[in-house]
Each structure stands twice: as structure tokens, then as C-alpha cells.
Image (cartoon, grey):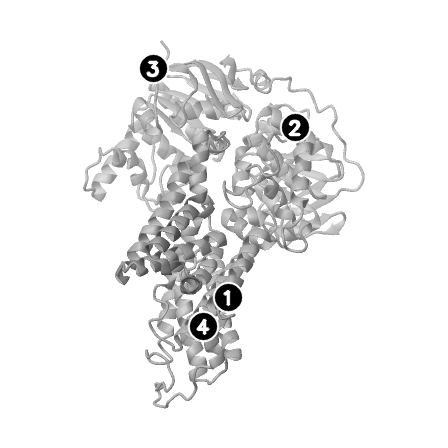
Amino acid sequence: MTPIDNQTRAFNAGAHPIPFERLRTLVRTSAVFILLAAMIVGFSTAQPAFINLANQMSILQAVSVVAILGAGVTVTLAVGGFDLSIGAVAASSVMAASYAMIVWGLKAAETVPLVLAFGALVGLFNAFLIVKMKVPDLLATLAIMFLLSGLQLIPTAGRSISSGLILPDGSTATGSYDPAFLLIGRASLFGVVPAPVAVMLLVAPALYVLTEHTRVGRLLFATGGNEVATRLAGASVPRLKTLAYVLSGTLSSLGGIIVAARVGRGDVSSGGSLLMDAVAAALIGFAVLGLRRPNVFGTIVGAVFVGILLNGLTMLNAPYYTQDFVKGVVLVGALALTYGLGRSSR
Amino acid sequence: MPLLKIDGLTRSFGPTRALGGASFTLDRGEIVALMGANGAGKSTLVNILSGALDADSGTITFARHPYAVRSPADAGRAGIVTVHQSTDRVGSPGLTVADALLLNSYADGSAPFFLSRRTIRRRARDILTKADFELPLDLDFAELSAADRQLVAIARAVSRKASLLILDEPTASISKPEAERLYRILKRLRGEGMAILYISHRIADLQALADRVVVMRGGKVVGSFNRPVDFEKAVETMIGRPLQSARPDTREATGAPIFEMRNASLLPGAAPFDLDLHAGQVVAISGVLGAGKSRLLSAIFGNAALAGGTMRLDGKRYAPVSVRAAIDAGVFMAGEDRHRSSLMPADWPGSTLAATISLPHLATWFPSGFLLGRREQAEAQHAIHRFGIRTSGPDAAISSLSGGNQQKVILGRWEAEPSRLLLLDEPFQGVDVGARHDIITAIRSNTQRATLIATSDPEEALEVADRILFIDHHTLIAAASSSASAQTFEATAR
């Protein structure tokens, strides 16, 4: 006796769009790009330095970490989950990388795989809590976020890590940052493209293809769309969820590596706003192309959108303390665009 | 002047006409049973009366006034209360039974702002006294049986002074003694002047309760039978043809069975049973809600474990540890309630017709892992032709299709690759008569595999199957040929 509601909805969805509806759809799908173009034109007119290549690259460099973390969150959103631990994973990866090089004296070639493995391990543990222990994803990753924020303070007794660090047992650390490691954050490809941007340009298309154009991607989204149907179609839902959280953890630690290489020290307060920024990018991504769902392309555009806005406003001498407010306004606008216009066009 | 007078009621959903001018009347102190096959328009009619849907045209007069309500709450105020089949929405876990009884007065503000346990108990007790039956007031609502939840809903209806009570399949998920208690209560309410309209197919219900049976078919009221009701005739009117006509093309079981179950028990303690399925044969399993139909199919599909017994597929031992193992062995299943078991939500990746079909076959169709090439589209196009799916093409959103066409897509999914055994759980839910005919033809045209269909509707079982089995208390109890009448079904199934 229940399918009536579903039928009503189904038939409304199939209604023929009248011209006004079509315009609405066009606005919904391209609004973010129209705004983006307007912003670029506006900022370049007001401040010609905005448009030069160096500034464009610095914008991309500023958003690269957020975009990489955002891509990870997008994958967890696709399986119907949510990874709140990404910021904490990135921050503790900064500490882990610094600790590995300064205290253990490891080189870049050892540090990078070690830190990536750390991120993957956290993702695996998240998945264990969510899949095996049946803890709701938000709660599990929130708990892990707390755990990691505390854990990263323990080895150094709460101190930031830099060369000559005095360890809790009184001895002095002898290692230092490997110059090769610092290149990850500071080198430029052909003297133009900063290394973090290059990493983003590798990671983003790879994840885009994985989620949108592969079998695994289809099944990841299927898990988030209808878990029962996915299981009854013969796919292993636990395995797909585990994959999503491991990917998210690994990408977060990659973000942490870039931050560490850029800053050159293990700062206890690093990565503070990463979680919020990455989640915001992923949610703004819902509005890009009017898809109303998590998508990697949208997430990257969302991150760049916020980056351009902040950079432009800074060039126009907007004070730094307005930044969070601006991000909030963009997010609210994007969500209203996604859900408000989306709903009425159904 | 009757209490309720419905005249020429129509309602369409897109291209589907669910109600095509339904008319009937109902008096105070009368119990009327509403009968009709799937898609006959019963639910639409009830949904309009309960305020969940609007009619396109037609008039309803209730208690001498034109009846136009915008919501179930409106309907309740006007005096029509509906008790739905899924009684878990009557209250919520964490509330006591007393709270659940008082939910209406909490919501409409007639309860005091500050509530003490004593006030709640006193008011709940009053409601039960008025309805004249007992319920454990301090129990958590979640621990209440389905039958008792129904009584909570009925007690609330009485406390709201409803003059028309609508019951949707009230005995579908309750035991026989519980059903008899319900009959007594309903008869007493009738004595007090309440009108009762209930949807049911069970002969037992109809015999025990109905003063009159109203039969719907194709969105219209096609017959009305007064007491003593000729049920055989009523069922024939409902399905629009004589009952005795067996399938002209019934196939007998020949050769070795494709699938065998020996000493199988679905739950610990349930009586063991055997089951044989042959190539080309369509076997229907019928039984009431909760009898174990879905559990049996799930066990064969590797989605639930058997409590005991063995299975063989093509003579070889078959013990699937997962759904994947079952699919790899050639056992496919289309689950009950397609929205829950098979479809992606609208606007989500994988919600197109083609992607719906390909979901279980992705690994076979795209061995490289990348979704390249036209395989998915080609398979979808093939299914569209084969089943006559009405759609704009392979990339159409599955939500834009009617229920019958959606069900054809699901069938297309599981026919896209060859199987040895196809399991279909309630494949005709929300499917109109025309699409049902197409689906039955398609199911029966495959003679290579065995097909097992679970359905709670005896008429559907008759229409599709060569052989009909009954399940009760998680065990197969008897077999009937497809020429058995609906009455024998009910007698056997009880």
C-alpha cells in the first residue's frame, strides 16, 4: 500500500520542463561558473595584479591541501558516510613527518611512505569502527578526531617539533628536515607550477576518474545511494566502505605531508581550519553543475572558488578576520542553491 | 442518507489512471470489506479518504457535508481515522504505550503543558476504558506486538470520536487468536454506530466480519455483495474471470531438478521441508506476511543462513556464503519492495535505467574496471525491446518510469545474464494489470532456468505459476495445483 508516495514523486520528476523550468535548470547547473567568471573579471578590474600568473598559482597553492582533503571527504560522502577525522589526520601527519625526520633522523624517501601508511591505518581503523563495530560514521570519525588531536601531543609532551627539539626524557633531537622533503612544499615545476599544485593536479583527476568512470566508483556511489540494493547486487559493502575511509585517510596524510614540507616544522596548531575548509569545499561541490550530490570535480571547483574569493578580497584589503565569515556566506549560498532551487524544479 | 457517499472519484498518476470513477456508499454501524487486486485502486481510494492524496475529480459527502481534507490530521478532525498496515508508525521506541495513546492530545495541544506520570496514566486509562480493552500502559512501545500496536491505533481513533474507521490489511501480520480478538472489538464498535471500512483478501476476515463486500477492479467499483457473501463470486469479480480456469500452458516437471532442498529448516525449531525446482517451471510460494517467504528466498540467495538442511544446484552441493557466491553460481534474486532492494535514489549516480540493469554485472561487463564502451547501453536497449519498457531510452531516470516499467527493468537486470534459478520476491508490488501480464509472459518464456516466486496474493500465484506451494510458520505445508480456488488457498494457508 506504500508505493503511492513513490509513484507520485516519480511522475512529478518525469514532468516535461516548461521554458521557465529550463532557465531555472540552467541557472542551477552553471551558477557557480557564472559567479566564478564574474569574480575574476571584477577582481582583475579592481586590482590588475590579481590576474597575473604568479598570483593565480599562489591561489592554487593555497587551495591545494584543502582540495586534496576535500576529494577524500567526497569519497566518504559517496558511500553515504562522512569523515570528520581528516583535519586531525592531516595535523598528526605533520607531526609524524617532523618526528620521523627530526627525532628518528629518517630521509624523505622513508618519511613519505611512513606517513601515508599512517593515514591509511587511521582510515582502516575508522572503517573498523564503522563497518565492524557499527558505530555511526559521524560519531566514529569525531571520536578519532579527538583521539588524534590528543595523540599528536604525547611524543613531544605538547611541544612543536623543530631541529634541536628537547625530548621529554631530556635529550636533544639530532635530526633535521630532509631538504628533499622540503621540495614537496617549496619546489616549482618549470619554475611556474608549485609542487603542491602539481600534486593536486595528479590527485584530483585520478579521483575524478575513479569515482565517475570506473566500476569501483559506481559501486561506491551505489553503497551511498542504497546499501541494501548494493549488497543484493552482490557487492561487498564493508569492503567498499573500507576503501573509502582508507582513501580519505591516505589523502589526508598526503595533505599533511604538503603542509609539513611547506612550513618546515611540526607545529602543534597546524591544520586547524583544514577540516572545515575541506568539508565546505565538498558541500559547495554539490552545487557545481547542479548535481546535488558529492562529486570530486565539484569539490575541486568549490575549493578554488573559495580560494579565489579570499585572495581577491585580501588584495582589495579586506581584513583577514573576515575570511571565515566569507567562507560561511559562500557555503550557505551554495547549499541554498543546491537544495532550494533543486527542490522546486522537481 | 448514508454516512459516506463517494461519487465518480478519479485520480491519475502521470499516465496511469489509478481511480477511474469509483462510487459507493457506507452507512453508520456497517462493516464493509474492500477487495481488489494489486493496482485496482484500493490504496488510492483509502489515501484520498485519509487525506494523504487529493482526488482529480468526483465528490465525497461525509456526514451530510462535502468532504475535502488536506491532511490525515484534517481527516481525523472530520471523523475519518485510518489504521495503516505498518503499525510501527503509531508510536515510537522510547515512548510508553500510555504516551502512544495520548500522542494526538500532545500534538493538538489538548494535553496539559506539564505532564506527570499520574496524569498520563489516568488519561491513557480513560482512553482504554472508552475503547474497552486492555493494554500494558507502562511498556515501551517498541516492545508491543503488531496486534497490540493496532489496538493502540484503534483506541486512539475511538478517543477521537471517529465515525469512520479505515483498516488496511488489519490481519496481515497477526496471529489467529489476535485476529479473533480484533473481530470482537470491531463488532462492538459497529454496535456503537461506528462505520468500518477495511481492506482484506482473507476469506476468514470477510466471513467473520463483513456485512458487505465491495469489489474494485481497474479503478472502479465493479460489484457489491451483501451478507451472506458469495466469496467465490466476489473473487471472480475481483480478478475478472472464472476461478476454475487453470493455466492453459501449465508445464509438468520433467527430468532432474535444477534445485533441490532437503530437510531444510528456516529457523531453529521450524519443521523441516523439501523443495524441488525444475527447468522451465514457475513455482509460486504463497503465505501470509511473516510466514517465511522472504526468508526462504534470502536463504537460497545466500543472504541468510539456513537453520538446517542441504541445498543442491544442478546436482552439486550448493551452500552460498554470500550474495556474490549465489550470483556466481547462477542463482539470482529480485528482492521485495524494489525501492528498498534494487533502486538508487533519484539524481544519484546509477539511477538511470541502464545503470540499474548493469549493477550486479559490472565486473562481467567491464573487466578492465573502467566504464568504457557501449555495453551497458546495448544491454539496456535490449531489455527495453524485450520487455516493452515505456521509456525515453537507456539513460532515462528510473524514477521517471511507472511502477510496472520499473519492475520490468528489475526483471531485465536479472535476465541480462543467464541464470539457473531466478528468485522473485513480490514481483508484482505496485504493478498495474497490463504490465503484470507482460512480466508474467516474460518470466514464463524462459525455459532454461527454474523460477521461484514469493507472493502473498493468491491471485498472482494462480496467474503466474505452474505449481503453488504454501508456507506457514517457516515451513512449506502443502502443494496445490494452479486450478485450486482462492478459498482452498485460504483454508490451506490458515
Is the C-beta separation of discs 1 and 2 under 8 Å? no
> Could you tell me which secondary element the residue under label 4 belongs to?
helix
- Please, what is the three-letter code of the amino acid marked with disc 3? Pro
Q: Residue B161 location, x and y as percent?
A: 29, 24
Dot 4 falls on which chain?
A
- Near-viewer residue (B119 or A303): A303
Identify the image quadrant of residue B413: top right
> Which disc, if any, is residue B438?
2
Please check whether the numbered discs 2 and 4 fall on a single chain. Answer: no
Which residue, given by chain and number where applicable, does mark 3 sit on? B66
The verdict on a common chain for dots 3 and 2 is yes
Left or right of B488: which side holds B72? left
Label 1 – label 4 distance at C-alpha:
10 Å
**Residue at image x 68%, y 45%?**
B375
Residue drawn at (37%, 87%) of the image: A164
Q: Secondary structure at mark 1?
A: helix
